[in-house]
Amino acid sequence: MNQSKHFPADFTWGVATSAFQIEGASAADGKGPSIWDTFCRQPGAIKDHSDGSIACDHYHRYQEDVALIAALGVDAYRFSMAWSRVQPDGKGAWNEAGFAFYERLLDALEANHIKAHLTLYHWDLPQGLQDDGGWMNRATAHRFADYAAEVARRFGDRLATIATHNEPWCTANLGYGNAQFAPGVADARQAIQVSHHLLLSHGLAMTAMRAVGSKAKLGIVLNQWTADPATDSAADHAMAELEYARSVQWFMDPIFKGRYPELALRAHGADAPQVHDGDFGAICQPIDFLGCNYYFRSWCSAATPPLPAPGKEGFTDMGWEIHPQGLTELLLKLKGEYDLPPIYITENGMANPDQLVGSEVPDAGRIAFVRAHLHALQAAMDQGVAVHGYFLWSLLDNFEWNSGYEKRFGIIHVDYATQQRTFKDSAIWYRDFIASHP
């Protein structure tokens, strides 16, 4: 098959961030606390004992950051809104000062001809809703739909896309399954029930946003991977099949097929979620796009200890295997299983132990990572997968959740003591790559 030399002329090139990781200003201008503000105060929750109260101070430095985005030559910026900034308790009154910040950000993006791609929920639930039970409380799904409708009503004509959730798998499994993320619960049954309420909230929000006449394209962002058996053993193959069902299919099947995958339901047994009549009808709404975040594959070994993954390319600073061909395999697998809308690769990138060397930040490993994944993406597109854009994670070094500031995903280096921003070599490479693919 002949590989195309270039991405399509209308292909979207972008960078991505999330609110809690960069904004700081955690109590400014009427913002309410989120579950991550609370989680950061739990002893031992954050590996370097830091928090997101300042982060990259993007709330005050957004104009500088938008200028940096423009200098990269990208045409799109994916960011999230802090729900508790615009509705401090997640219910009740709206905070106009919070909405005004996002108005100013959109103004700056529009002035630089950068399309805005908004995520409504990137893990930072208002603490006021957590006090009412958080995502274990079915009512939170309805509060989320109210929030989505208000954002779409105000900004729907200024946004290219609106995603309901970023990586609900993480919200459920890391937030409620193993206590790695906020709110810090370790309960398998709760994690599975939360995953259902997240899907329900997505569907309700899609309906609510369409009801207010949003002009933005509407969808969801899922973290996805292939699950590969370590050997040809029956045990490893069964493990891989179950892993894929419990992760990728668990979120895709309700959205596209109106049901949960039977294999995963059987495995969950008594922990399977409580589903009300009409829930799948609510969830199974048409979506205008699917956001796919890809970082690694799942390597499934029934051996104890597990067999090591054979990756020739090494591992990132997060300990994640570098496996770019998995992106091709994933996209082709999804194409074969579902009637897909246009896809955006909404996150792809790597943590690297970057350091300033004089006035430069060499990060050849990240350049190799992105180049290899773009080749893998192009291979999938050459085989008929409709991918409309790529967003590199991340614009800035930032607060990397429970890792604090120890892990650097940015293509722009941030000195947290001075807030000085410096283009890494990868930023310059990405700028030049985009310029060569007009």
Image (cartoon, rainbow, N blue to C red):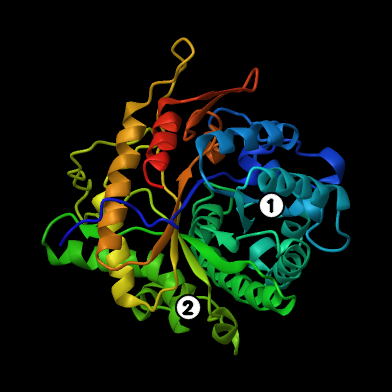
Image spot of residue 82 (x, y percent): 71, 50
Residue situated furthest top in the rendering: 358
Seen in the picture, residue 388 relative to 43 is either above or below; the reply is: below
Residue 398's quadrant in the figure?
top right
Residue situated furthest left in the rendering: 232
Residue 150's quadrant in the figure?
bottom right
Count the marks: 2
Q: Quadrant of the N terminus?
A: bottom left
132 lies left or right of 6: right
Residue 81's label in the rendered image is 1
Seen in the picture, residue 354 relative to 228 is either above or below; the reply is: above
Q: Name the residue beneath numbered marker 2.
A: 254
Image spot of residue 391 (x, y percent): 47, 49
**Local crowd at mark 2 within 10 Å, few (<14), some, or many (≥20)?**
many
Image spot of residue 7 (x, y percent): 35, 54
165 lies left or right of 241: right
Which of pointers 1 and 2 lies earlier in the amino acid sequence? 1
Residue 42 appears in the figure: no
> Disc 1 residue type?
Met
> Disc 2 residue type?
Pro
Q: Secondary structure at mark 2?
A: helix
**Local crowd at mark 1 within 10 Å, few (<14), some, or many (≥20)?**
many
